[in-house]
Image (cartoon, rainbow, N blue to C red):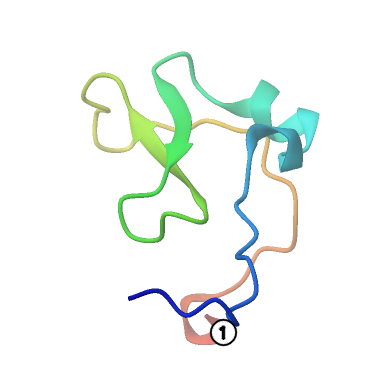
Amino acid sequence: FQNTTDSPVAVETLDDVPEHVLRGLPEDVRLFPSAVDKTRLGVWATKSILKGKKFGPFVGDKKKRSQV
């Protein structure tokens, strides 16, 4: 049984991702549908990422752990 009165759910696509975000992804990281929320994109690694690996560029405001 499907409720036909439900409004359609918007699904995030690669077209919704700003170009600078796509350029900042390491070569072994891809955006695919999230395993947690199928309406959103998730970040997936195509091979192991070493602990401490840094990538970017970072865009936004840095927050302290106590602020998040």
Residue at 56% from the left image edge and 84% from the top image edge:
67
Q: According to the image, label 1 marks what residue?
A: 67
Residue at 33% from the left image edge and 59% from the top image edge:
36
Residue at 21% from the left image edge and 25% from the top image edge:
48
Is 41 or 55 nearer to us in this picture? 41
Is 68 or 42 nearer to us in this picture? 42
Whether residue 57 sits left or right of residue 27 in the image: it is right
Residue 7 % position (x, y): 65, 75
Examine the rendered structure and indicate whether residue 67 appears above or below residue 9. below
Residue 38 % position (x, y): 42, 54
Q: Quadrant of residue 61?
A: bottom right
Label 1 neighbourhood size at 10 Å, few (<14), some (14-19), many (20+)? few
Name the secondary structure under disc 1: helix
Tag 1: residue type?
A: Gln
Residue 35 % position (x, y): 31, 51
Residue 49 % position (x, y): 27, 28
Q: Quadrant of residue 5?
A: bottom right
